[in-house]
Image: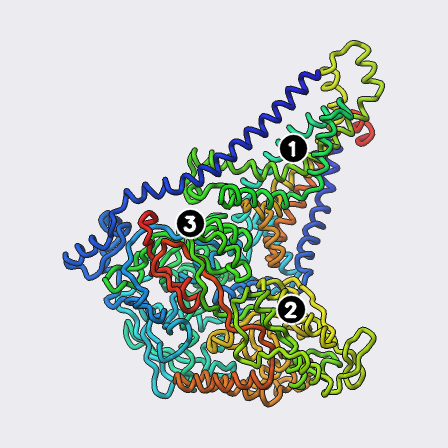
Amino acid sequence: MRKTLTYLLVAIAAVALLSACAGQPDAEEAAADVPAAADTSEEAMPSSTYESCLEAQAAGMSFCEAPMLAAMVEAGELPPVDERLPVNPAVGNNRIPEWQAVMERGEYGGVLRLVDFDAGSIGHDAGWISNEPWVETEDIAHDFATMTGNIFDLEISDDDQEFTFHMRKGMKFSNGADFDTEDVQFFWDHILHNETLTPVIGTTWRSGNSPSGNVGTLEVIDRYTFKISFDQPYGGWPGLFTYGSGPHRFIDSDYLKKIHGDFADPDELAALLDQHGFEAGEWNRLFGIYGSTNRQHETGLPSLGPYVLTEMGETLAVMERNPYYFKVDEWGQQLPYIDRLEISIVPDVNAATLKIIAGEVDMARRGVNAADMALYIQNAEEQGYEVVILDMHASLGEIYLNMTYADEAWQEVINDVEFRKALSFAVDRETIIDAVYSDLAELPQTMDPTTDVAQAEAILDSLGLDQRNDDGCRLTPSGLPIEIQFNFTPFTGESLPTAEIAAKNWNDIGICTTVKQLEQNLFLTQAAANETQAMVWWAHYPRWPWHESGDYIGQAWQRHYAPLWMAWYDWNLAGGKEVAENPDETDPLIVGVEPPQAYKDLRTLQTELFATSNAADHARIWGEMIAIFRDNHFWISAADPLKNPLIVNDGLGNVAKLGFQIQSANEAEFYYWQDETRR
Amino acid sequence: MLTQYIGRRLLLLIPLLLLISIISFALIQLPPGDILNMEVLRLRSAGTQVSEEQVEALRQLYGLDKSLPEQYWLWISNILFKGNFGTSFTYVKSVSEILAARVPLTALVSVLTAIFVWITAVPIGVYSATHQYSLIDYFWTFVSFIGVATPGFLLALIFLWIAFVQFGISAIGLFSQEFEAAPWSFAKFVNMLQHIWIPIVIIGMANTAGMMRTMRGMMLDELNKQYVITARSKGLTETRLLVKYPVRTSMNPVFSTIGWMLPGIISGEVLVSMVLNIPTTGPVLLQALLNQDMFLAGSIVFILSVLTVIGTLVSDILLVWLDPRIRYEGVA
């Protein structure tokens, strides 16, 4: 019997060995297979696709197209390129400053590999590539002086109340359907003004971006021209449509009519509802599915971006070129140059980092952190990618003190600007920049960035906070200990180290501070309920006065620095209607607390900013707002502006290596493979 | 008598499952906030503007404006009468679609892991017991202690690091890069087999180690019993004696774990799957819980609970059927 058992053991060992052997060649094969696969694709493609383009132009075509589309036209699956493009397509790139110096004529073909790490979604790098804003400004700076048309051309009236949009004649959605004023009218009448789909029309569509402003009106002038008017000046309005995506993303009306309760055939609609498990009458929920860019491969969602989703697996998504894309290069070649995007979907940011340093990603923005710089650079040369340092569009770890946090000791001190100044003087920004951002950041420019602990202590002493309790915490004049609890949630990697460094700095000057990590949802709920005393969070200011304009008045979704001031505005500014209707309401979360004059001035300036389209006025108003932040220390800026690396494969051409990182990562329709083996 | 036993157990399942469904639904609602907080955060970070008015529209879109009991009733009645587990908010997909895409692979990994565990742990356990305190016994004891003490995700991380340093590749996922986008073919299948042993060995490691020890302990108990000595004195060959009696008795713990295997087949190993990027259902459940994607999380928890209950029933029945001693005590 011993023999039998010995055999068994030997067999087990053999199995283990076999599997180990099966694994090793796998790794070697993978390494060996990549160039092999590239070789075959090189044979299949001619060296320059531009030659065939010149031939097409010689034969009388205005534009030319990728070989993969030419083959489909040949096979009768697509109309010719001149019929697919608008008569006045968008030419070249307006978004990147000094783009002319960078722009090269690209060659068609190849695959761009990306990575994303949100379950079931490709919303980030690929999502940004798919966005087509209404109009564009240079380098997302929102400078109206550089504004140019994208999907529309725009004329703004002198009184900043009328906006006339000129559409591109013959422009089409990715399914070949016409994109004209009929689609705009459908959006306006049956989505924006449909109570089921839009229960409350947002401030975006109201005069002056105010909740009490009147909703604008749409006037269709002809098939390709429409006008939107407001009853008050709202010149800043187009600034809301210069980047990203949102409720203003257009979808073909014929496609939407099939799921819209007012238009769809009742039997077909009932069948659709049943198929998706919704109750009768819940047709609005179909919009979630049929409008989702993550299900485009199933629904055929017509879109305007350079790529359409064709496959969405558990670990890989594939997007292919949109044959109707409305942009061409200066040589008449329809964009994009690259045929396909392959997006690896991994479970978390660490897996994404591993793929990046293994050279398995051609372009990566999101999930690329300054803190991992050493790792990227260490592997860059061997794996054939470049680490490009670009500007960051957001501040990732800003420090907020809640001015309206309901704690007796806190209220004694926090509303004194000198106290906030002392806390700001205590924050060791050099250490934060070094430890959190690998030196890829500068001292903040919107406030006094001095670190001066002695001065901080002197200010606190002069405020009468010179007494301390047994724990060394400073006491308020009435004898209460001043304690700060910092909340953060690990949404960006910068929040924890920033909070810890600031907490240490404040403990050193006798302001007793503790740091507490919260689960994201709890964090957001507490912040909204005015239960957060201090937090570290990300924000888009001070570079983006338009988008997320709420960030700098504390109005962002998570309400950082004064939730009750915000509530006061909501309660009192909606025409005083709420107050009149509910005279007995006393809940501070609803009625709020009256803010100081400086904050009211900030809000007034924000209203002025939204009212005008004049770039010089914008600069002036923005300057005044920054002066208010600087004088009042409503929050403590840790570092600003930031830089962030962008990972780009060495063989990829036409990637802008200056300006904003998110903008460069966005320009994939212009990328092409300089490395012929990748085409 | 056995049918009566099974019938009684089945009847008991009904109130139990109802209770489980209520608890799993309530548990997911317990933490503060809801899916919208997370959804808005995600949308904003992806560059989509979201105003508070739009949040209200989303709330209606998701049916979150209804009361809790109403939401529960909609959920459970859809499961009972239509077999519809609801729609996930983050995936914008029905729960069945999400699970259909992931359960087959999860089941494959789990079953292969179980087989790996059995074919390694049982023989090693038996060998260690019959050769107690021999060099090989010490060796396997050492290995099993390490195996039990090292979490699977740590092994996975170490493995990834070695693969990266040695071969310069990211050894995550089930396919090499060139096969990832390819349609199914024999070559792709072979490529998958070359990758799938990694999670199997890593996930199986702790279980193998544990089961090895259990098997060894059980065997040692049995080997000293009088029936073994009697059988041996009657001249039975050692192999026949071992396999027919003590091994059979010692296998009881193996069968009782079949009950836990059933939910395990569907749930998969969360952390190892996360680290190795194996698209099993484990990471989906984790994400759903973190995001408060309540129908997805609730349905997975519910399905897992049902499977645990059924699995326990199956393993009880198996034990009753296999071991006459339990049959007489338990059923009568």
The label number, if any, that marks residue B117 in the structure image: 1
- Badge 1 amino acid: Val
> Visible in this render: residue B2?
no
> Visible in this render: residue A672?
yes
Q: Chain of mark 3?
A: A
Discs 3 and 2 lie in a common subunit: yes
Residue at (52, 43) in percent of width and height: B171
Residue at (47, 83) in percent of width and height: A622
Q: Chain of mark 1?
A: B
Residue at (57, 72) in percent of width and height: A557
Q: Which residue is mark 2?
A: A499
Crowdedness of circle 1 by 10 Å Cα count: few (<14), some, many (20+)? many
Q: Chain of mark 2?
A: A
Q: Where does residue A272 sit, x and y in percent of width and height?
A: 46, 54
Q: Which residue is mark 3?
A: A311
Cβ–Cβ under 8 Å for marks 3 and 2: no
Q: Where does residue B308 sit, x and y in percent of width and height?
A: 68, 42
Residue situated in front as seen by the camera: A273 or A309: A309
- Badge 2 amino acid: Ala
